[in-house]
Amino acid sequence: MNVRGFRAVCAAALMLLACRTAGAAGFQLVSVPDGTGKPIALAIWYPSDAPATWQPLELFRQEVAFGADIAGARLPLVVISHGTGGSYAGHHDTALALAKAGFVVAALAHPGDNWRDRGDSFTLRNFTERPRHLRAVIGYLLTAWPGREQLDPDRIGAFGHSAGGFTVLVATGGVPDMARAAALCREQPQDWGCQRARERPAGAATSPAAAPEWLHDGRLKAVVVAAPALGNTFAGDALARVAVPVQLWQAADDRITPREWNGDIVKAALPAAPDNHLVQAAGHFSFLAPCSVALQERASEICRDNPGFDRAAFHESFNAAIVTFFTKTLAAH
């Protein structure tokens, strides 16, 4: 998207009262109790009129009002599900854009599948637990979080990248067939996810399971899905019960979740056409926040973009489009 296009998107968001320019984004870190597993680490951004200062966020820095009061009432909520081995910080720039536009944004670190703890990564347990984590976080925010009275329980959306995209599709009604994942790994053994699953002792991420329980959450009213993983498990009618608006982002040069057996299948399986975006020259990790020097030194793979692709410039239009989508689909009634 060029500069003129970006301005047009933001102008549309302004018309929808989305581009909040006053004040700053407030920020909190909390731990959500989970009766059936480890506590869930949660980062929360929200509108605030307090002055912001630069604060560390894992390997990033962000300008926020740490612990400040929330500004506004009946605020819409967006929850963020990161990809395999990711972090609640990985999409912080998108979270900040939404918070400054009037949303409360909560990004969780999935227990067992984050950069500090990968005990469940590439296992069936991980994929069945992730939607439950999402539901537990929403339940906490609506019933126990100190700011709950300022949330609108009828306006909740979700954003998911990679395995997080799989997560939010399940949460909105998707019923994946994991036998398709096993079949894909036999046909495409070079697939990045299949290679990682084979490195696990049981390789359960690609093994057919006897009727796994897939938990849904009817409180979700709209979702953004970026570079979804395990997309082929949603072939056929697996997404027939997804009845909410979907914005789908795909990278033209995705070598982690190639779109021909991931995003393209999701796009075709959705009962209603998504708001579809194919980003030329982008790779799988281009949807993550622009890298800090510290992250570049720690994990250069996820910071590497194709020559000529400007991740920071792309994220200006990417974040503006997400703000516009959620403002429209989670509008107050």
Image: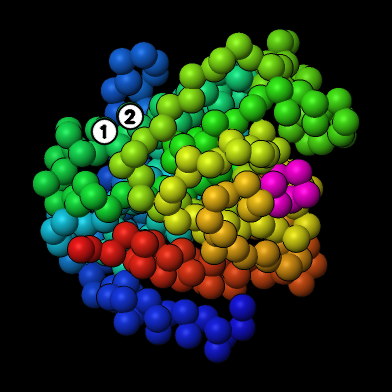
> 154 left or right of 270?
left
Q: Give the range drawn in magenta.
A: 259-265
Where is residue 263 drawn, in percent x and y? Answer: 67, 50
Quarter of the image holding residue 204? top right
Q: Position of residue 285 (x, y in %)?
A: 66, 51
Q: How crowded is mark 2: few (under 14 residues within 10 Å), some or many (20 or more)?
A: some
Asked which quadrant contains residue 228, the reply is: top right
- Identity of the residue drawn at 69% across and 47% down: 265
Q: Quadrant of the N terminus?
A: bottom right
Q: Which residue is drawn at 59% across and 73% down?
A: 313
Give the residue type at disc 2: Ala
Residue 162 sits above or below residue 325 on the image: above
Out of 155 and 28, give the one closest to the viewer.
155
Residue 273 horizontal side relative to residue 150, left or right: right
Q: In this view, does 78 lie above or below 219?
A: below
Task: State the image coordinates of residue 114 (x, y, percent, origin top left).
Answer: 53, 31
Q: Mark 1 points at which residue?
A: 139
Check if mark 1's residue and mark 2's residue have beta carbons within 8 Å. yes
- What SS does tag 1 mark? helix
The residue identified by callout 2 is 136
- Label 1 and label 2: CA atoms lie apart by 5 Å
* Quadrant of image for the C terminus: bottom left
Compared to residue 77, the image places residue 125 above or below, namely above
Q: Is the magenta stretch mostly helix, strand or loop?
A: helix
Q: Where is residue 31 in the image (x, y as percent from the top left)?
A: 30, 30
